[in-house]
Amino acid sequence: MEFTKLIEVRYSCKKYSDRQVEPEKIQEILEAGRLAPTAKNLQEHHIYVIQSPEVLAKIDEVTPCRYGAPTVLAVAFNKDNVFIYPGGKRDSGIEDATIVATHLTLAATNAGVDNCWLNFFDPDRVAEALGLPDNEEVLMLLDLGYAAEGAGPLPNHSSRKQLEETVTYL
Ligand SMILES: Cc1cc2nc3c(=O)[nH]c(=O)nc-3n(C[C@H](O)[C@H](O)[C@H](O)COP(=O)(O)O)c2cc1C
């Protein structure tokens, strides 16, 4: 899909049908994450593909926001392998994982797969539910699937501030 069109049509899907996402589409989405840039090319992220009923049920215990999606990606990063920025106050973990997650999200839309970025959860509880090692922190969850009949963008999808409110030329 043409990029301008892609960012226009992406929306947060909040009701999914039972139809599972095809493996080749999952692969295409994961590949877009693989190609994401990271600080110092550390690639400290790890993506978990959650499709089994048992683990999806665990996701439902830690967030109300799966909305019936048959696949959920969990994007985590290795806290012990981040680039510490000058000043020592911040590091690359969250940024790198966020760039990966953005690639995944846009690639999903490009593949015709509906999706929703989730952060309404306690990351420690998600890490525990997924049995992640202590050095991994969950950045986000990404619902993937196909919109249920009648589902579509919420009204706030078309509500964005004007550029004058968020941009200053100096
Ligand atoms: C960082 C982030 C966290 C979000 N967390 C959730 C969430 O936990 N649950 C949810 O239903 N939507 C979540 N969303 C979706 C937003 O509510 C949605 O992107 C926003 O309202 C704009 O709508 P749109 O994506 O359809 O344009 C999140 C989006 C972002 C970018």
Image: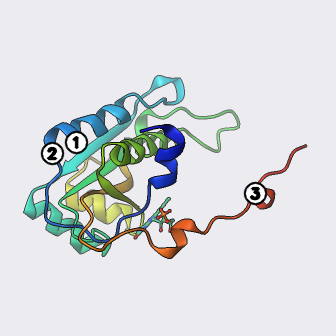
Which quadrant holds residue 143? Answer: bottom left
Label 2 packing within 10 angstroms: few (<14), some (14-19), many (20+): few
Q: Nearer the viewer, residue 22 or 49?
A: 22
Q: Residue at x 52, y 52 (%)?
A: 8
Locate residue 161 relative to residue 103 in the image: left or right.
right
Q: Which residue is mark 2?
A: 22
Q: Marks 3/2: CA distance?
A: 39 Å
Question: Tag 2: residue type?
Answer: Glu
Mark 2 residue CB less than 8 A from any atom of ligand 1: no
Q: Nearer the viewer, residue 67 or 11?
A: 11
- Could one spot residue 94 in this view of the protein? no
- Could one spot residue 42 in this view of the protein? yes
Q: Are marks 2 and 1 in contact (CB under 8 Å)?
A: yes
Q: Residue 12: x, y in percent?
A: 41, 63
Element type at mark 3: helix
Question: Tag 1: residue type?
Answer: Ile
Q: Marks 2/1: CA distance?
A: 6 Å
Q: Select label 2 or label 1 by which is in front.
A: 2
Locate residue 31 relative to residue 49 in the image: left or right.
right
Locate residue 83 relative to residue 18 in the image: left or right.
right
Label 3 packing within 10 angstroms: few (<14), some (14-19), many (20+): few
Q: Residue 114: x, y in percent?
A: 31, 56
Which quadrant holds residue 61? Answer: bottom left
Label 1 packing within 10 angstroms: few (<14), some (14-19), many (20+): some
Element type at mark 1: helix
Q: Residue at x 50, y 39 (%)?
A: 3
Q: Which residue is mark 1?
A: 26
Q: Is residue 157 depicted above or below 20 in this figure? A: below
Q: Is residue 74 depicted above or below 65 in this figure? A: above
Q: Which residue is mark 3?
A: 166
- Disc on the earlier residue, 1 or 3: 1
Q: Nearer the viewer, residue 27 or 47?
A: 27
